[in-house]
Image: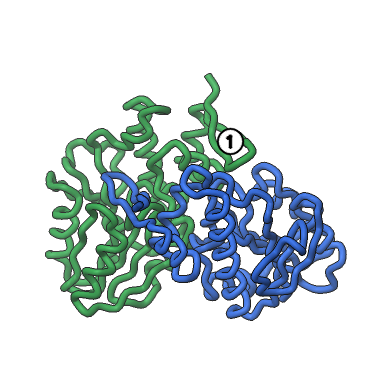
Chain colours: A green, B blue
């Protein structure tokens, strides 16, 4: 299956700016992308990176499509051109495993959705030419409505690993707890470790 | 399978105090517990509520065990007495479905763990007399270590629904997005609705 991995080089992971400077956020985003590309290949998918400017991508680990439009029109252009099933998997799923992706790829349904925490859509499989994406706002609900309006069957994947996109400092704890790839190693090398308090586990960074 | 559902009546859901008063938190906790009990039964489990004082429980919807000790010794007392497999499922898993619980109950392994967001342990299956729980701190890691030390096989369940315990205001959005039971209805009746911002979806409450 063709697997499109949207990846931006423009101010990546901006909500981590409180704990990582811009160069670090760029390097961490690249580490997560590398993990996603590897997991996609291990699950039998053919990854393509979809980015705003193909010249901006360093350490290319998959074919690259450049499209300077926003996420929604750029992904829809891929769907316009598709002649077979397409999956869209976000580049910041640092907990992803081949097993989680196999569940996604092998689930039946004209549209398969893996919701992200907070109403997003972290991964999709599109098996019908009438479906188009809309990533603005609560895209999980919007994608269900778009599929319903087109009369398409929808399957929702119940996966903590696919639901965990890494946007905010609290998400870094999930990478340290459950990650097993470059992203976790990058965080550990940068001095991050788990901090256990009375409530949920957070992270702390050594100097 | 015997399924123990720990449930406290002492200052329940204290981290929701900013958005719900004490009576509301008590009612919301009860709505979540009702959903969990129903899902456990629908998945073929035999639910028992484990609480600090059996006399404090109203609207009893399952057999009740009273134990005034903290969560860890109270659950371990159940494990001490167990003569067959025991599952422990937290009462605040408002997104739980019979399908998610069937995956838990049917997974192989002497210990089966469904991690919660932030390093907790939201659900367990214990199939070996040597395993004991320790819910303090990052219990997901501790439970893996306890099983490893005892030479027990561990299976980890990758479920967003089991990973989502409801502790903080941001978690309420998940209930509105993915819940389908009493807890979601309770929140809607209390005036909560999704609020879509640029980042993740949150909640707002009408007067």
Residue toward you, A199 or B155: A199
Q: Is residue A37 visible?
A: no
At numbered mark 1, what does the secondary structure look like: helix, strand or loop? strand
| Observer able to see residue A104 | yes
Q: Quadrant of residue A121?
A: bottom left
Q: x, y percentage for residue B160?
A: 48, 60
The number of discs equals 1
Q: Is B59 placed left or right of A36 in the picture? A: right
B122 left or right, relative to B69: left
- Label 1, on which residue? A194
A101 or B23: nearer the viewer: B23
Residue A79 % position (x, y): 17, 64
Q: Nearer the viewer, residue A27 or B47?
A: B47
In the figure, A4 relative to A147: above or below?
above
Q: Chain of mark 1?
A: A
User: Residue drawn 75% across and 69% down?
Assistant: B64
Q: Is residue A35 above or below residue B84?
A: above
* Left or right placement of residue B77 versus residue A129 in this view: right
| Residue A149 location (% of width, % of height) | 19, 75
Please provide percent x and percent y for residue A76: 16, 60
């Amino acid at each position: 299956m063709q697997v499109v991995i949207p990846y931006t080089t423009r101010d990546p992971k901006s909500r981590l700016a409180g704990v990582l400077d811009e160069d670090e956020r760029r390097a961490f985003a690249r580490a997560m992308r590398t993990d996603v590309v590897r997991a996609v290949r291990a699950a039998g998918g053919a990854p393509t990176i979809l980015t705003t400017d193909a010249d901006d991508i360093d350490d290319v680990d998959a074919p690259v499509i450049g499209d300077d439009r926003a996420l929604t029109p750029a992904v829809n252009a891929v769907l316009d051109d598709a002649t077979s099933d397409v999956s869209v998997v976000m580049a910041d799923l640092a907990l992803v495993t081949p097993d989680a992706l196999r569940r996604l790829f092998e689930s039946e349904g004209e549209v398969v959705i893996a919701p992200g925490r907070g109403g997003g859509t972290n991964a999709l499989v599109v098996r019908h030419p009438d479906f188009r994406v809309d990533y603005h706002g609560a895209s999980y609900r919007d994608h269900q409505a778009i599929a319903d309006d087109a009369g398409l069957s929808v399957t929702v994947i119940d996966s903590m690993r696919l639901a965990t996109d890494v946007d905010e400092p609290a998400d870094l704890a999930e990478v340290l707890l459950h990650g097993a790839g470059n992203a976790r190693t990058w965080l550990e090398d940068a001095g991050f470790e788990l901090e256990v308090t009375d409530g949920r586990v957070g992270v702390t960074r050594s100097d």
